[in-house]
Image (cartoon, helix red, strand yellow):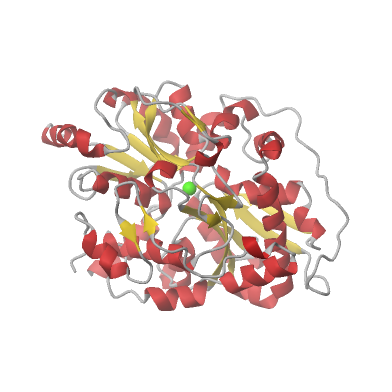
Amino acid sequence: MSKFSRRQFLYTASTTAASTVLLNACTSLNPPAPNQPQTTASPAVNVGGGEGPEITTARLGYIPIFEATPIIVAKVKGFFEKYGMTDVQVVKQASWGALRDNVIIGSKGGGLDAAQFQMPMPYLLNEGLITANKEKIPMYVLLQTSTQGNGIAIAGKHSGKNVHLDLSQAKSYFTQLKGNKKPFTAAYTFPGANQELWIRYWLAAGGINPDTDVTLIAVPPPQTVANMKTGTMDGFSTGDPWPYRIVQENIGFMGALTAQIWKAHPEEYFAARADWADQYPKATKALLKGLMEAQQWCDDPANRDEALQILSGREYFNLAADILAPPMKGQYNMGDGQPAINDFNMGPLFWKDSKGSVSYPYKSHDTWFLTENIRWGMLPPDTDVKGWIERVNREDIWREAATEAGIASADIPTETTRGIETFFDGVTFDANDPMAYLKSLKIKKVAL
Ligand code: CA
């Protein structure tokens, strides 16, 4: 098997999801919230953009983590209906692998037209790298659903070892674990996507090589809680509200928040099958308008409690709202002697953050995700990053939808790059020169 096909095998073989774990772990512990808020749909009106959408239905997939909030809120609060999409179905997915498979099938086969995505999953679908028989499923990245709101949880047995944001203080401890043939074992949710990339970035920034100093695994859903409790799994990278559960149940503590690793970082996205978006361009924009309205609504602190009630519903997260509340409001008990964080702007944000727009899908961020895949040998160094992004990132559709929806021009970025990004360890990334970034990194798999 060639190196390339082996890599494809790795991508397709492992499809577990933390969210499934979250769901499995928590549904048995918490009764469903009793009062699911009723849909508050306003009558469909034509808000900009001429005549109504070509179709009023769409099937949208989501994973029950905070990143899905705008999709669920747009449905429940009637924001899709407002823009003429009167029969949108939001469909909970059991895992990232299941979500991928349902997008491959499409709604004609009972699957999905569009979904929430980790990066660079839409690109890997587009290129046929995570599909059976390398089938290419053309995709459009249309909107970013959220920033921040993710973290790396650490098993309690590693307390007092400085397994915190700056891992350089814990390097000798990691070396010791490896020497004792019990290397630190950390789990993520889908190969090559956000959660694996965050944990790899964090380890490497502390001088720990994620490929040789630790063991990284995809999480088998039914075993995660038990693994974390018994300490056979040492760390776990995932979206909120999961990290808070780890602390609350005294299973462990927070190693780092992604908001600490990279403030206002890109997180998850809304992407559609290109054939669906091409066939129904007005419906596509109507979905984006509904999502944008939901994102603005979600970022009003006065609405967060209602958002929590919506998410806690049986057909959505099926978790008590008081469990979801602290991380939704940026309140993190970090544990292991670290100061608690209580800052709305360190939690998940949906419309605006300290760097500007959350909703707008910056091409420079897609460039980072693809570059990071190259860094770790998940994509070859000669990947046509620019060409891929030209075909898949449709920030132009976001821009059109925003303009038609009457979004203030100050909230519509004028550039497709957000500028030079700076990580917590001082490393910088300029999307105009990804090679300089790769060269600057001390720990990487790619040979340059
Ligand atoms: Ca995430």
**Residue 304 shown left or right of residue 77 in the figure:** left
Q: Residue at x 62, y 38 (%)?
A: 317
Q: Taking 310 as reference, is 394 above or below it? A: below
Give whichever of 247, 399 is nearer the camera: 399
**Residue 290 shown left or right of residue 372 in the figure:** right
Q: Position of residue 340 (x, y in %)?
A: 44, 26
Q: Please identify the residue farthest to the front as the structure is shown.
A: 410
Q: Please identify the residue farthest to the left as the structure is shown.
A: 179
Image quadrant where one finds the N terminus: bottom left
Q: Position of residue 62 (x, y in %)?
A: 59, 51
**Residue 384 shown left or right of residue 18 in the figure:** left
Q: Residue at x 62, y 65 (%)?
A: 412
Q: Is residue 310 visible?
A: no
Q: Position of residue 8 (x, y in %)?
A: 34, 65
Q: Taking 389 as reference, is 248 above or below it? A: above
Image quadrant where one finds the C terminus: bottom left
Q: Residue at x 38, y 73 (%)?
A: 385
Q: Residue at x 77, y 37 (%)?
A: 37
Q: Is residue 338 visible?
A: yes
Q: How many marks?
A: 0
Give whichever of 223, 425 is nearer the camera: 425
Q: Position of residue 131 (x, y in %)?
A: 44, 66
Q: Taking 9 as reference, is 310 above or below it? A: above
